[in-house]
Image: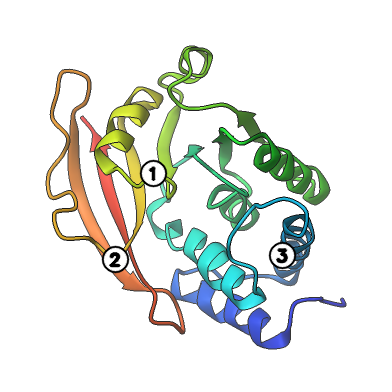
Amino acid sequence: MTFTMEMENRDLLVEGAKVFGIYLHEKEVEAFDFYLRELLKWNQKINLTAIRSERGIVLKHFLDSLSVYPYLSETISLLDAGSGAGFPGIPLKIVQPSLEITLIDSVRKKVDFQRHIIRMLGLKRIGAIHGRVQDKEVLQSLTGQFDTVISRAFSDLQTLLLLTYPFLRKGGLLLAMKGKRERGEIGRPCKGEETQYRLQKTVSFLLPQSSFKRSILLFQKR
């Protein structure tokens, strides 16, 4: 197998994935290699991501996406809200084919890219929707459909809690992926007539072989 990814970045991907309990086979590395190549190629024409280096994509997109893998052991159906160029949903699908994943993003060109990657990798039981989670049609078709909702695109956590609540089944999980926790960032569930969560835990960590701080907030729908 001939890879286009530089050896040091391939090693970073393989060894970094192990930190999250994932042991990549050659076929999976091949899929990530294709994903990287297509992202760099498409990004020359349309702005899919501000990260333009191989190492940056492996670290801040691929490995960051895989960091939530340890918390998906009881997940069958997953909604990736604001999925951008397919993160974290597509990397999670590559390493866990049994997941049933729906990606949604409001930017058409990003959804087109997601669909391209899904088609070229031959991924099954994963679909990409052009829209927003607050759209009436999206709410009508997807309400109460998911074990887990995940997002790393919302900067306002309270808004994320409010908008994603309808999509979760009772007892389902919301995984909010963040950079390092800001002072005043959530320490309790959002309270209101429309939402009711229990904050299960907050996990803070460094991305493998880097100084980039990340955190994952896990909320359970009551």
Foreground label between 1 and 3: 1
The image quarter in which residue 114 lies: top right
Tell me what residue is drawn at x 46 percent, y 17 percent. Answer: 139
Question: Which quadrant would the N terminus be assigned to in this image?
Answer: bottom right
Marks 1/2: CA–CA distance: 14 Å
Q: Position of residue 134 (x, y in %)?
A: 43, 22
Residue for badge 1:
154
The image quarter in which residue 33 lies: bottom right
Question: Which quadrant would the C terminus be assigned to in this image?
Answer: top left
- How crowded pointer 2 is (Cα within 10 Å; few <14, some 14-19, many 20+) is rated as some
Secondary element at image label 1: loop
Q: Position of residue 137 (x, y in %)?
A: 53, 13
Against 25, residue 92 (above or below) is above
The image quarter in which residue 205 lies: bottom left
Tell me what residue is drawn at x 22 percent, y 60 percent. Answer: 182
> Is residue 191 shown left or right of residue 24?
left
Q: Position of residue 81 (x, y in %)?
A: 47, 38
Q: Looking at the image, which residue sits at the far right?
A: 2
Secondary element at image label 2: loop
- Of residue 208 and residue 51, the one placed in the foreground of this image is 51
Please tell me which of labels 1 and 2 falls first in the chain.
1
Please tell me which of labels 3 and 2 falls first in the chain.
3
Marks 3/2: CA–CA distance: 25 Å
Residue for badge 3:
36
Residue for badge 2:
180
